[in-house]
Amino acid sequence: MAMTARQKSAKHRDSVRIGIIGGSGLYSMEGLADTREVHVKTPFGEPSDAFVIGRLEGHRVAFLARHGRGHLLSPSEINYRANICAMKMLGIERIISVSAVGSLREEYAPLDFLIPDQFFDRTRGRASTFFGGGVVAHVGFDRPTCAQLSGALGDACQRAGVTAHRGGTYVCMEGPQFSTLAESHTYRQLRFDVIGMTNLTEAKLAREAELCYATVAMITDYDCWHPAHASVTVSEIIANLTRNAANAQNVIRETVKHMAARECKCGAALAHAILTDRKLIPAAAKKRLAPIAGKYL
């Protein structure tokens, strides 16, 4: 018997379609009901932590602490491929990523939020693709975030009463050290807006996995360029993160509550990206990539 439109809608709402990645200062998601922990094994290893799956504003969501609960992993140690692959395996279609950043512009003050639409890569040697090992793919990445999801986050900030800036460039450095003064001034001359250590790698992998991805960048400091901030301290960052945690939770709830149907093209990013002759792809590569690109292989 065919399902009615109402039954289909109810089934979709009962599926885990929304993933939340919490960064520094956001290690759990308040307000989740009917929660359970799920450990996901992926072909790319272990994710940062167990996923906490529960119901938020009528939708089932999956929350992951990027650095692990207790902040055990540095930006360079995170298994980004496992994190994104696990979300794909759970059936997630959209990822809301929350992270701490430093501001490179006077008008973007600590405690403000930024919803970036561009990234600039300053990482070194990270595993930032699922492909290789006998399979070559090139996805489009000129617009690295999902415009629909980013717009929803911006609207949610407005409803939640959070000062947010829409659009801008997030420069992703390797870390774990903070910037030198020379680097910070150079990034300002290049007209970058905020600096962080994690989100670009996630965005690349999310695009390959055909998942929508958008960032809530929580500004904690002015990096080291600002004359009133001779250096960035962890204590300063943690204090601002604590103050912004409630705002981040409210923005996420508002976003999930008003989430519209998916209308972007993120779900077809691999449609014309794989160049390798399918007959020549090794069996091991097909098995490894099955959760990400199985329908194309």
Image: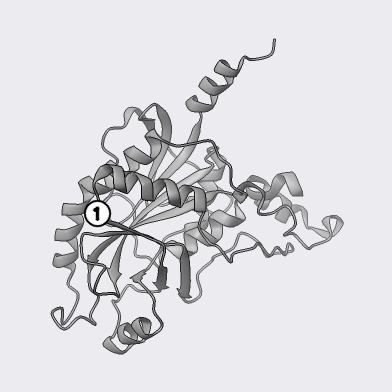
Colouring scheme, one of rainbow, by chain, secondary structure, one colour: one colour
Instruction: Residue 257 in the image: state x and y as whole percent.
Output: 38, 33
**Residue behind mark 1:** 25
Residue 36 in sight from this viewpoint? no
Q: Quadrant of residue 182?
A: bottom left
Between 100 and 192, the one lying in front of the other is 192
Observer-nearest of 1 and 254: 254
Q: Is residue 235 left or right of residue 85?
A: left
Residue pictured at 37% horizontal, 68% vertical: 197
- Name the quadrant containing residue 93: top right
The single residue placed furthest to the right in the displayed view is 279
Quadrant the N terminus occupies: top right
Crowd band around label 1 with a 10 angstrom C-alpha radius: few (<14), some (14–19), many (20+): many
Q: Is 237 situated left or right of 51 in this image?
A: left
Residue furthest out toward the bottom: 182
Residue 214 drawn at (x, y percent): 45, 53
283 to the left or right of 11: right
Question: Residue at 29% across / 40% down in the picture?
Answer: 29
Q: Is residue 289 above or below residue 189?
A: above
Pick whichever, 193 or 292, lies toward us.
193
Image: 85 above or below 200: above
- The secondary element bearing badge 1 is classed as loop
Amino acid carrying mark 1 in the image? Gly
Report the number of numbered marks.
1
Query: Residue 31's x, y, as percent?
Result: 27, 33
| 24 horizontally vs 204: left or right | left
Find residue 270 and report its horizontal and vertical position in percent: 69, 54
Res. 205 in view: yes
